[in-house]
Image (cartoon, rainbow, N blue to C red):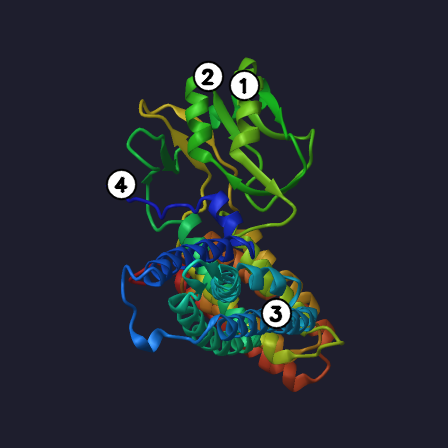
Amino acid sequence: MKVRSKRLPNWRWEALRTTLWFVPSILIVFGILIFLITFNIDVAAHFDHIQLPTWLRSGNSQSGREVLIAAAAAIITVVGVVFSITILALTLASQQFGPRMMRNFVRDVGNQVTLGVFVATFVFSVLALGSITVYPHGNFVPHLSITVAEALLLVDLAVLIYFINHIAASIQLPEVIAGIARDLDSAIDTEFPAMNREISVGSSANPRLVLNEQPAELLATIEHRGGAVLASKSGYLQFVGYAQLAKIAKLVDAVIRLDYRPGHFIVAGRPVAMVFPQGAAQQVEKALAKAHVTGPHRTLMQDPVFAIDQLVEIAIRALSPAVNDTFTALTCLDWISSGLSRISGRDFTERVYRDDEGRIRLIGADWSYPKMVNRAFDKIRQAARGMPAVIIRILDSLNAVVDATTTASQREVLLRQGEMIMKSSQDSVNDQNDLNDILWHFNRLVESIEARNRPSGT
């Protein structure tokens, strides 16, 4: 039975999300459209084509100008002051949390909408102000537009209160860590869908992604007789168009083996893939330049390890002598264990894309469970030397992940981490009572692994 995978996000849409101009631009256009509607209604009322309610009357042209000038000035002042103070607060917070704070602030939809509402109101007020003029029948006063501008001021006040509360909550450390963990869960569900054998990629015309079917003979042929495909530019690999590459491979009757996955740094002029036969390498190289998206930073689109690295970075910053925040490191370990537990139940075999005829067209770079576990715990273990509380939490985190493992090889990786932690503790922890506590938690980890390895019914 085929199980459809969660659709991968479009990299162009992801790039637009990580800007402070896209959503505000849409809201500005929306504000202009509202003004055009209200302006036409005001013109019709001015020439007595329609009758506006009496409560919409806002005085003469001079009083209307004063209201709109005050509104526009207040809005642009609030935008400048509030966002400047926010940027300053985020800059200070990023010293503890890492540089991701600024990127998360820019990417946050609530912040984008807040900026957009303020700027759209400013544009509306300026347009309404410019519409006040003199007609043969007397001064034109856009009563409806002025009333709408006043209503937008009330909306802006509510948005300002929301924004202040949102920023105050978003820079709190538990919320930052939980947000990264949510991104990790989403990236895991996208990149490692829960399935056993086969995933349909896109429509029925697209090539199929098949797991656990990777002939060693084909790999050996590609390695020895294939042609290298070189990277066109340097940067972090952010997105790979697997289905697009598989279609191109079918068109040129070739097989592509990718050497890198999203999150890896590629260097221009260095091999990033192998193609068999060699004659198709040039055509594939042109296609690869379009299917591979590189940039100056990593993203979460197809790189769940990036979220793990973010949690690890916060943890080791917290364990540094300058910060010395043990509880933050413990919180990060809790969420890391949650993410690794989710990952442990997924398939890590290399991915093979086949066309509609069942022929292999694309072999993706593999995901390594041992590497992911090591990325999650190595740096924290090294930073936690001589810190019994953190060492014990690492052992407990490993124990929690054991319950979610599906193979003995996964549990062997976790046991290796536990053994390294125990050895480091014996060298760095001087108090015997602390060592006894660490040993007890290590023995519990070993017992859990042995119980999981034991055949059922024994």
Alpha carbon separation for disc pair 4 and 3: 49 Å
Cβ atoms at labels 1 and 2 below 8 Å apart: yes
The answer to which quarter of the image holds residue 148 is: bottom left
* Amino acid beneath label 2: Val
Alpha carbon separation for disc pair 4 and 1: 32 Å
Residue occupying image coordinates x 66% and y 70%: 84
Front disc: 4 or 1: 1
* Amino acid beneath label 4: Lys
Where disc 3 sits, the SS reads helix
Q: Is 206 above or below relative to 408?
A: above
According to the picture, the residue beneath numbered tag 2 turns out to be 252
Count of marks placed on residues? 4
Residue occupying image coordinates x 36% and y 30%: 207
Alpha carbon separation for disc pair 3 and 2: 53 Å
Cβ atoms at labels 4 and 1 below 8 Å apart: no
Q: Earlier in the sequence, mark 1 or mark 2?
A: 2
Front disc: 2 or 4: 2
Cβ atoms at labels 3 and 1 below 8 Å apart: no
According to the picture, the residue beneath numbered tag 1 turns out to be 283
Residue 427: x %, y % from top left: 73, 72
Residue occupying image coordinates x 37% and y 49%: 193
Where disc 1 sits, the SS reads helix
Cβ atoms at labels 3 and 2 below 8 Å apart: no
According to the picture, the residue beneath numbered tag 4 turns out to be 2
Q: Earlier in the sequence, mark 2 or mark 4?
A: 4
